[in-house]
Amino acid sequence: MKTLYITLLSILITGQTFSQDYIASNGNRLTSSSRSSTSLSSFTIEVIDDESFSYTQFLNKSKESKSVYKVDGKQIPKKELVKIFRKASRKSNEQQEFNKYLATNYSSIYSQLTPMELNALYSKFSKKTIARYLSTLPSIL
């Protein structure tokens, strides 16, 4: 009777250990699949839908994110996309310059965006740039 009890107990412990290992291995698969590539439109939707968009907060979140976006067969991390759009908005005084900068330096990104998306991205990323402050300065004085 004692050996039967010990045998059943060892089977139960082994079964629990096996199930815990199975759950842990499936958890790793889920995190690796969460790094899958998505289209550039999902990035623009995420930026545009954020009502209280702050570049610094968004950049910090993107550094922690493992999201990768497909642009003409290349995979670009979310952090790099944020930096690209911020740089383009910093180097531009108006929407047309923003579009021209992207078309010249990042034509693959520019070609995947609609004019409405470009306009919304420019307004979000240029919100607190020096050029934006300087453009509003004469109207204050």
Image (cartoon, rainbow, N blue to C red):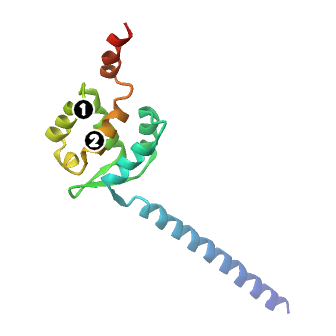
The quarter of the image holding the C terminus is top left
Q: Residues within 10 Å of mark 1 (few under 14, many from 20)?
A: some
The Cα atoms of the two marked residues, 1 and 2, are separated by: 8 Å
Q: Position of residue 89 (x, y in %)?
A: 28, 31
Residue denoted by label 1: 95
Instruction: Give the quadrant of residue 80.
Output: top left
88 above or below 62? above
Closer-to-camera residue (116/55): 116
Q: Position of residue 32 (x, y in %)?
A: 43, 62
User: What's the residue type where badge 2 is placed?
Assistant: Leu
Residue lying at 18% horizontally and 35% vertically, measured from the top left: 101
Query: Is 116 positioned to the left or the right of 102 in the image?
Result: right
Closer-to-camera residue (130/26): 130
Q: Position of residue 63 (x, y in %)?
A: 42, 42
The quarter of the image holding the N terminus is bottom right
Query: Is 101 positioned to the left or the right of 67 in the image?
Result: left
Query: Is 6 positioned to the left or the right of 103 in the image?
Result: right
Residue lying at 34% horizontally and 29% vertically, measured from the top left: 126
Q: Kindly state the secondary structure of the residue where label 1 is placed.
A: helix
Query: Is 87 positioned to the left or the right of 128 in the image?
Result: left
Judged from this view, the residue extending furthest toward the front is 139
Residue lying at 38% horizontally and 11% vertically, measured from the top left: 140
Instruction: Give the quadrant of residue 106.
Output: top left
Residue denoted by label 2: 118
Residue lying at 20% horizontally and 33% vertically, measured from the top left: 96
Q: Are marks 1 and 2 in contact (CB under 8 Å)?
A: yes
25 above or below 96? below
Judged from this view, the residue extending furthest toward the right is 1
